[in-house]
Amino acid sequence: MDNFYIDNPDLKFHLNHPLMKKIVALKERDFADKEKFDYAPLDFEDAMDSYDKVLEIVGDICANVVAPNAESVDAEGPQLVNGEVIYAKGTQENLDALVKAGLMGITLPREYNGLNFSVVPYTMAADMVSRADASFVNVWGLQDCAETIHEFADADQKNEYLTRVSGGETMAMDLTEPDAGSDLQAVQLKATFNESDGKWYLNGVKRFITNGDGHISLVLARSEEGTHDGRGLSMFIYDRNSGGVSVRRIEHKLGIIGSPTCELVFKNAPAELVGQRKLGLIKYVMSLMNGARLGIAAQSVGVAEAAYREGLEYAREREQFGKSIIKFPAVYEMLSKSKAKLDAIRSLLYETARFVDVYKAYDHISKDRTLEKEERQEMKHYQKLADIYTPLVKGISSEVCNTMAYDSLQIHGGSGFMKDYPIERIYRDARITSIYEGTTQLQVVAAIRGVTTGGYMKQIREYEMADIKPELHTYRRVLIQMTEEYEEAVERVTSFNENEFVDFHARRMVEMAGNIIMGYLLVLDTNRDSKYWRSLEVFLKIARAENKANAEVIRYSNVNDLGRFKVE
Amino acid sequence: MKGLKIIVLAKQVPDTRNVGKDAMKADGTVNRAALPAIFNPEDLNALEQALQLKDKFPGSSVSLLTMGPGRAAEIIREGLYRGADNGYLLTDRAFAGADTLATSYALSCAIKKIKDYDVIIAGRQAIDGDTAQVGPQVAEKLGLPQVTYAEDVLETKKKSIVIKRRLENGVETVECPLPCVITVNASAAECRPRNAKALMKFKHARTATERQDASEDYIDMTSERPYLDLPELSVNDIEVDVAQLGLSGSPTKVKKIENVVFQAKESKVLTPSDNDMDELMKELISNHTLG
């Protein structure tokens, strides 16, 4: 029987990373839950065994339910009936299967009926679901939003909503509006407090809302009358059972057609305030978006995996000039490059997930007891890393995913352009990953802090000092050269003391840092398992050249370029 | 309506759906080592029907009963992961070599021992033997009415159950008094997936024999968590006439095994034209392959 977990040993490899020992210990807090819950792990090995076995369930459902439904879901799409969203038949089947398997609320604590899994296995589940059907991960994966309720809502809200998410209810995050896309400070949806019944009411329009008709929505709204910026925005929970929101239309899209993208009209919709007023955008949306960005990175890796497999299979089977086309350098190069990049973005994805895991686990512990000084420092350390790695992995993996889908379709030739092979759907689905939850350009805006504050550099030094086998030293030398080149480039760009000049070269520098980081991650992966050797070699060949190209642009650039490139 | 007590009969079978070259040994017996052992597919359909009844009538319980060697405990765990409440492994050397008659005799004795039940549900047939005899024979031995080829339970009343049967030429709805035996077709609802929490709860469940096996890596918590003990039933645990068990209780004798190799004798090349398609259809209709 097909299984997306078993047929992809890279997942298990990343699951068994040495840092998991720390993560599980923090997440399970001395395994105290074993006294209260019959499904809680007894010790580290037991927890890891549970992760492994549950991921096998996910892999089974992905291979045998979600993937076979993907084509019909894409053809059918969701329908709008009387202001409500009806999922495509396959989407509903997928959801039913995952709910029955108890795969909602994966990261939520057991007191809310969750599985209390760490972010790493949850991300792996998202990786597999995305490989099976990128559109469906948007429905199922929005359970992510529950983390924001978990972090910031009050006890009653947590009891009510988190338990419902674990029970299978879906979520949505209602942020975007017609005039507030990348710039969320412009959100206008109005929240009014009614003194007589002590409730908040929402009025206005939201647009491009994924799974907008979900059971539980987090809504960003303007609670402070007369304000115009982010400081006037608060976060609310809207419960679909309360009514007051109708779906005006479902967008017709290029890809991820199974995912209902809704325009919502709020008419006196009752809602509950989350946390404190005015912190909606500044604090809560930032947390929400970070979770969502990691989710899109997982989606990108999953779609890239699907693209690679389709390309590989086709190249092996298709014969031209009397042999399989995979025998031609022009074709096998596309595949080996794809595989190397796929291994690189997956490694970056799980590195980021681990950073998020450690930081979040400490954050939750800190709500129950004061952290020791060392714990506090460690939490800060991982939080910083999570903050600079999240936009990096989202930006890079989504771009790689697009390139890989492009190459895989290219390998298919004319057949790839037809509806006969899954690659045309994968190609269309890939396109959104570098756009939503912040475009690549916006990820660069967030990631550039990791360049200018030296955050990436610090971590690169950590990797550089790692104990590795002698036969890997040669690759480290390449990476050290690339690091010197990167430092020079950053030095040059910042030496002009001109913010626009930094912005102008930001993507180049972020990409350079990303390549060095992914290069080191592949060195460390190869150190643990020599099967990554090939990907390491191929990746470094490509990455070194890419960095050199970016470095050359920077070397011959000065502030006059701002004038040369400006288009008005 | 009160909860139902349901027994599901399940069998661990070699996966004959993906048979390779080494599936049979030279002596004509099944090479079990070459074929993965799985939950008999139609028994999973049976389990799903039982779980649906349980969903519908809170307070119901689903018990699995399987006969086989020690490793068949895997089937019980698999059932527990999908929502069954407990299970019994009927295992003893005395059962070895049983044909359908001896198997149904052993199962019916075990069911008499378990005693308390409203419905017994089994798959129509196992993919290794394909006899479809065990379910009906169990019903006969227990003196219970039986409904075979069941596809769906339409209604459950106080003293009877309404079932849709899938027959060769259509469907049939029958009402049958309880308790009864139902055998379920592959056309029935597919079994639900394993449930994450149930899996984590029951993954350490072992039979006493498995616990003794030092090569097994397990954590014994059966004293605090009795549900982790999978009860084994041996000949000594059930009231049984040993002569009717195993090989001695099996009138079926394998006389000879013939290897049948399918070969295409003749082939015909058709061009993808309307005319050729038309000719082919006419030929198939005239030789009664179609219609």
Image: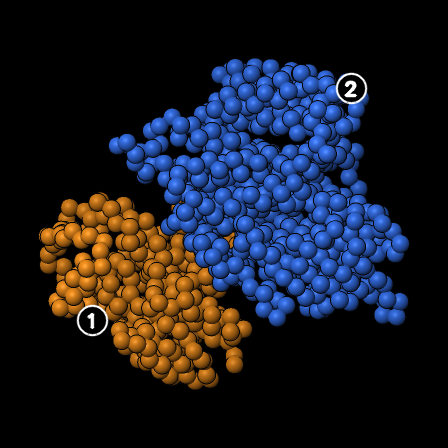
Chain colours: A blue, B orange
In this figure, which residue is indicated by the disc labeled 2? A496
Point out residue B260 in the picture as x, y percentages from the top left corner: 13, 53
Residue at 47% over, 29% down? A337
Position in image of residue A81 (x %, y %): 58, 69
Circle on res. B291: 1
How far apart marks 1 and 2 lie (CA) works out to: 84 Å
**Same chain letter for marks 1 and 2:** no
The residue at the point 54 percent across, 54 percent down is: A257
Residue A422 vs residue A381, the one in the foreground: A422
- Evaluate whether residue B212 shows in this view: no
Identify the residue shown where x is 49% and y is 43%: A427
Secondary element type, mark 1? loop
In the image, residue B118 lies at what x, y percent? Answer: 42, 77
Q: Is residue A406 visible?
A: yes
Disc 2: CA contacts within 10 A as few (<14), some (14-19) or many (>=20): few
Q: Nearer the viewer, residue B252 or A95?
A: A95
Look at label 1 and name its amino acid: Gly
Q: Secondary structure at mark 2?
A: loop
- Residue A439: name its quadrant: top right
Residue kind at label 2, given as amino acid type = Phe
